[in-house]
């Protein structure tokens, strides 16, 4: 579990429990995990390559929502 799993959006009450640097570092790491073709892989073990591909779309959309909410797509 990562800080952004608990508090993906700024301005929420739970975000106050995390130091700003911890969130910034986690956002940097999340940005760095983008694969060359533009998506994000899942960070859990799947039972087949097809399942990993299926979940990849969800992981990419979730990551983009987090980055947009934290104003990381404007860079």
Image (tube, helix red, strand yellow):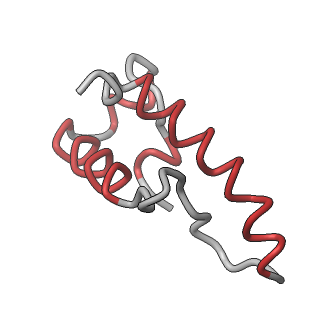
Q: Position of residue 52 (x, y in %)?
A: 73, 70
Query: How far from the left and from the top, in percent, is residue 40?
Result: 53, 56
| Of the pair 17 and 57, the residue shown nearer to us | 57
Answer with left or right where residue 61 lies relative to residue 70: right
Look at 51% across and 35% down and name the residue there.
64
Q: Is residue 72 above or below residue 24?
A: above
Residue 32: % across, % down: 31, 57
Side (left or right) of 11 relative to 64 = left
Which residue is located at x 34 percent, y 49 percent? Answer: 31
> Between residues 19 and 26, which one lies in front from this camera angle?
26
Q: Residue at x 75, y 59 (%)?
A: 55
**Left or right of residue 11, residue 38 in this image:** right
Position of residue 12 relative to residue 51, above or below, is above
The furthest residue to the front: 37
Horizontal and vertical percent position of residue 58: 71, 47
58 left or right of 75 in image: right
| Quarter of the figure with residue 53 | bottom right
């Amino acid at each position: 579990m990562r800080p952004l799993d608990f508090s993906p959006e700024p301005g929420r009450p739970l975000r106050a429990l995390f130091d700003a640097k911890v969130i910034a570092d986690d956002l940097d790491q999340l940005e760095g995990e983008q694969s060359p073709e533009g998506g994000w892989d899942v960070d859990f073990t799947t039972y087949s390559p097809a399942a990993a591909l299926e979940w990849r779309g969800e992981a990419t959309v979730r990551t983009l929502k987090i980055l947009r909410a934290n104003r990381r797509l404007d860079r």
